[in-house]
Amino acid sequence: MRIIVTHMSPDWDAITSVWLIKKYLSDWQDAEVKFVPAGQRVGNKDGLMIKDPVEKIGEDEVIQVDTGLGPLDHHQTQDANVSAASRTWEYVLSQFSQANDRMTPEHKEAVSRIVKIVVAIDHFKEVFWHEAAADHYEFSLLGVLEGLKYEKPCQDKHYLTFGILCLNALTAEFENRIWAEKEISEKGMKFSTKFGEGIGFETLNDTVLKLSQKMGYVIVVRKDPRKGYVRIKTLPDQNDKKGADLTPAYEQLKKMDPDATWFLHVSKKMLLNGTPKNPKMVPTKLSLKEIISVLERI
């Protein structure tokens, strides 16, 4: 039997370590997970003497992570750039070529970014995040996991199942973000407005909209090259600072292409032509350049 051992009430470092082993190491997908008191291990050997993460204990193959001072634990070092997850990820990449073989560069980068964040929070560096005490951080996976432990105490397997579900979803989200970053860097059509800089894309990736806004672009437009749909967003008003009003663009685009379906959100900050939520909407025949020319004049 293959067994993965980690500590009780697993945190994101322990959960991520188990996830990496189950997801990427051949024949470990169905490994049983056992939980021990923090610092302890299965077997009687001194973890500091163990060199190979895979131990033979009786008839079982065992990997111990984030506990027991073995090669995939990190409590024997003060290095704040190391955690069990980072050591497990290094082990996966260096010891098992098949993990590398089936990863795209984007996938590998996505997991590496996740591991980097896990290392930071395992060393409590979230206290240095911008406005670290703000309520919205309780909406993060850190807050959700802590709340889950209050709601369902002493259910370690439940925390692990939840964490693995989240990490799989996060990997997909990070891959999408990395793709969006590349689209912004290589394909974005920058333009100027009286409100500030804008950027436009012809891409399948919808993440470019929000990511571009986070990067400071005032107006962002995306045209779906497959369906022809268009989404235009501008930054929301902030305190006394008023953002762009898309009403003039809405009125002009309706004149230029009256057959298309145009929807102006009540906030005047979002202008839609087509959405998966309404398949009856008619896409515009206007090109991205024509739409940008309208936005430049509002």
Image: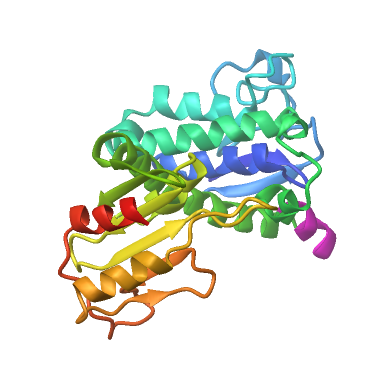
Figure check: 157 above or below 275: above
**The C terminus sits in image quarter:** bottom left
Disc tally is 0
Residue range (magenta): 145-154
The answer to which image quadrant residue 252 occupies is: bottom left
Q: Is residue 283 magenta?
A: no
Residue 203 visible in the displayed image:
no
Figure check: 44 above or below 22: above
Q: Is residue 152 magenta?
A: yes
Residue at 43% x, 64% y is 246
Q: Position of residue 118 (x, y in %)?
A: 62, 35
Q: Nearer the viewer, residue 286 or 295?
A: 295
The answer to which image quadrant residue 105 occupies is: top left
In this picture, residue 72 sits left or right of residue 148: left
Residue 15 visible in the displayed image:
yes
Identify the main secondary structure in magenta.
helix
Figure check: 250 above or below 296: below
Residue at 33% x, 73% y is 251
